[in-house]
Amino acid sequence: MSKLVIIDEPANAGGSTGAPPAPAVHLPGLLTFEAAARHLNFARAAAELGVTPTAVSRTIKNVEAQLNVRLFNRTTRSVGLTEAGASLNAALAPALSLIRDSLSRALLATDQPSGTVRVSSSYVAYRILIEPHLDGFLEKYPLINVEISLDNQLSDIVSTGFDIGIRMGRKVQNDMVAVQLGAVQKRVVVAAPDYFRERTEPETIDELLEHNCIRQRYSAGGRLYDWKFDDSGQTVQIDVQGRYVFDEMRSVLDAAMQGRGVAFILENFAKQELANGRLRRILTRYSGLDDAFHLYYPHRKHMPGKLRAFVDFMRTANRP
């Protein structure tokens, strides 16, 4: 196992300073300490490192025992650095950052980037933009694994241990890079054929007020999506009504297929259901433009090879 040995050079090569020998500390232990010091949360550090919080706690105890100093003040509710821990982290963090940058440059110089790309994505973005091209990516890069977490929230990908996130729009934290993935998405009005067996199909936007419209929130407790349409170059908004409200577009899609109402949904997300006839588009002369999806990731001087490969491949595969 690799380990870092810190040795004080004697002032006189022929003599002894009388200082005790420096303890040998394993490099994985220092990496664990740095992650825990950065997050001040053992669970988040564990998620980043791919281990359990118990393993992080055990490793920190071993490092403290090896150095014979307490590095963290721990309670059931909080984790904080001691003075010795803060001092160690101030010296250690830049050194480990330099090591990571060196490894990133080495990976960028190879033809076969490797490792695991951890992706945080909404389900809609995954289904439209990632899932159709995932097999091709894995075939091209056999040394890269992909781990995907589906979540509608704009997650703090750094604190949760992800390499990259995918969300609608480009509004992200200041220290993030956002790049567009695919074209601007178009919304269309759809319903199941069975829904109109005892109803008259609307021919104008205003007639949507006579129908049960399936609505969607941006997130749990967030505001409702606006039903905005392009009508001969003018934007028209209508305050539709309905008995169903979801915070997930796949639930809107399912409800529409079950004949429970009319939905205003991303055309690309409903492409398969429109093709097989489970849904059909209505008010075909009207549509609405949403935003484009964006990849977002931390700004880095040197992007890891595995991340660069994922970004470049998916942007090319989804090029408008």
Image: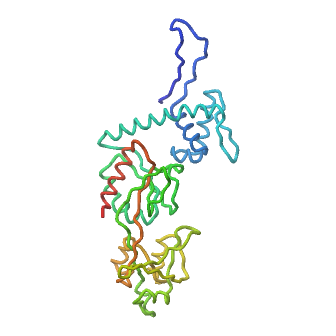
Q: Is residue 189 left or right of residue 33?
A: left
Instruction: Give the mark count.
Output: 0
In this rendering, is residue 209 above or below 87? below
Where's residue 36, x and y in %?
A: 58, 41
Residue 278 in view in this figure = no
Name the one closer to the observer, 290 or 188. Answer: 290
Residue in the image at 41% along x and 67% along y? 291
Residue 83 appears left or right of 247: right
Vertical side of 113 occupied by 148: above or below = below
Percent x, y of residue 227: 47, 78
- Of 3 and 187, nearer the camera is 187
Q: Who's the residue at 39% across and 42% down the image?
A: 302
Measured from the top left, where is residue 300 in percent x and y? 43, 44
**What residue occupies the far top of the structure in this picture?**
14
Query: Does residue 105 sit above or below 207 in this rendering?
Result: above
Inspect this view and state whether residue 173 appears: yes
Residue at x-position 57% and y-position 9%: 16
Residue 60, image x and y in percent?
Answer: 60, 36
- Quarter of the figure with residue 189: bottom left
